[in-house]
Image: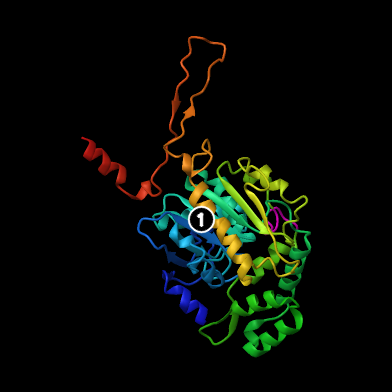
């Protein structure tokens, strides 16, 4: 807790009001979490989604750390996806519903465009939102995730087994100490055990329950359906904007030899390994998925994140990076190289103010020009 206090003083932190509710209509689902205000005024926004069941609080030190410098470039919204944390619950895990949740949050919070990012399942939510709503997305940053079928990966089958074990007990008939004892006996992974423990919530009745929708989650991962947490459906299409993928060298979720190919397939602007796809060196640790638990690894991921935000995110695709904005000009469409009468012109790619939809910046500029 001391570390949290030390880091929070560098930024304005605000937990979102409201409690998680079960919704009958998918369009009524509201996302909640915490917002970290950046260190400067009028900064663009970054919306980040943690792994399934992972509390948003676990990522606050990562984004708040002044050495990581992420808050120098963005306001950060750390949100729980639907059915997790304080966000609303609904049976559907369909990728289009997940994507629409993001845009709905942006509209209610008056965010025109944003950088979307996530970790594990959270990265799937971010990428899905980018695919369905590219006009609202300046870029996508994925941590330890690849858009493919991960239902038979060892790491996911382990998670599925843990959820099945949780489904065997009725927490409302148990004390917290009894639930903790069950977790200690049945959840072998210390990290998942800690996450599940953090998800315990005491109801007004005095009974205990999970913060996530256990029944919906268990139903989703028990059947090999197209909307499974660990499956990337073809119907999501492509994300044609700027994207970046980073994962641990010995990741259990992204196998370096083959699992990087789907990144290039879904995100055609990704230039390949060493450019937009990076493996971060580290030990062969089964817990390396949780990058914020390792100081050195966390700093490297944050450096990749910061470079993407400062140099590539939101930059026109025909430019190399932000250094070319306003300096390099792009040739216009060539009718025919053999046509001697054609005049080959060029233009400077346009870049829009990040919150033009909810701001009068262009309207005020027109008034001044008159």
Main SS class of the magenta portion in the image = loop
Towards the viewer: 91 or 161: 161
Instruction: Indicate the secondary structure of the residue bearing disc 1.
Output: helix
Question: Which residue is label 1 attached to?
Answer: 102
Query: Residue 68 appears at what percent x and percent y?
Result: 52, 64
Q: Is 122 a magenta residue?
A: no
The quadrant of the image that shows the C terminus is top left
Q: Can residue 28 be seen in this view?
A: yes
Front residue of 243/297: it is 297
- Give above or below for 234 relative to 292: above
In depth, the one of 18 and 339 nearer the eye is: 339
Count of numbered labels shown in the rendering: 1
What span is colored magenta in the figure?
224-231
Kindly identify the residue that appears in the image at 60 percent across and 78 percent down.
Answer: 198
Q: Coloured how?
A: rainbow
Q: In this view, does 335 lie to the left or right of 156?
A: left
Q: In this view, does 108 lie above or below 61?
A: above
């Amino acid at each position: 807790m001391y570390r949290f206090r030390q880091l929070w003083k560098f930024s304005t932190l605000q937990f979102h009001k409201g409690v998680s509710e079960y919704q009958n209509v998918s369009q009524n689902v509201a996302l909640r979490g915490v917002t970290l205000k950046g260190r400067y005024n009028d900064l663009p926004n970054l919306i980040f989604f943690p792994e399934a069941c992972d509390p948003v609080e676990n990522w606050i030190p990562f984004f708040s750390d002044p050495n990581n410098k992420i808050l120098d470039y963005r306001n950060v919204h750390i949100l729980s996806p639907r059915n997790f944390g304080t966000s609303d619950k609904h049976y559907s895990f369909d990728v289009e519903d997940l994507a629409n949740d993001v845009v709905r949050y942006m509209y209610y919070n008056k965010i025109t465009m944003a950088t979307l990012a996530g970790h594990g399942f959270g990265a799937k939510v971010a990428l899905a939102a980018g695919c369905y709503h590219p006009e609202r997305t300046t870029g996508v940053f994925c941590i330890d995730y690849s858009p493919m079928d991960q239902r038979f990966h060892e790491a996911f089958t382990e998670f599925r087994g843990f959820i099945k074990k949780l489904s065997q007990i009725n927490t409302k008939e148990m004390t917290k100490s009894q639930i903790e004892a069950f977790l200690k006996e049945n959840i072998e992974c210390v990290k998942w055990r800690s996450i599940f423990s953090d998800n315990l919530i005491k109801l007004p009745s005095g009974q205990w329950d999970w913060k996530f929708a256990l029944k919906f989650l268990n139903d989703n991962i028990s059947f090999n359906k197209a909307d499974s947490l660990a499956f990337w459906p073809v119907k999501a299409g492509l994300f044609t904007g700027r994207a970046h993928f980073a994962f641990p060298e010995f990741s259990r979720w992204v196998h370096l030899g083959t699992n990087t190919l789907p990144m290039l397939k879904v995100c055609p602007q990704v230039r390949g390994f060493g450019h937009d796809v990076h493996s971060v060196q580290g030990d062969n640790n089964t817990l390396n998925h949780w990058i914020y638990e390792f100081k050195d690894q966390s700093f490297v991921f944050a450096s990749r994140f910061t470079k993407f935000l400062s140099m590539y995110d939101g930059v026109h695709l025909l430019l190399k990076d932000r250094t070319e904005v306003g300096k390099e000009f792009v040739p216009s469409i060539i009718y025919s190289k053999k046509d001697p009468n054609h005049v080959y012109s060029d233009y400077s790619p346009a870049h829009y103010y990040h919150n033009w939809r909810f701001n009068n910046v262009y309207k005020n500029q027109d008034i001044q020009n008159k």
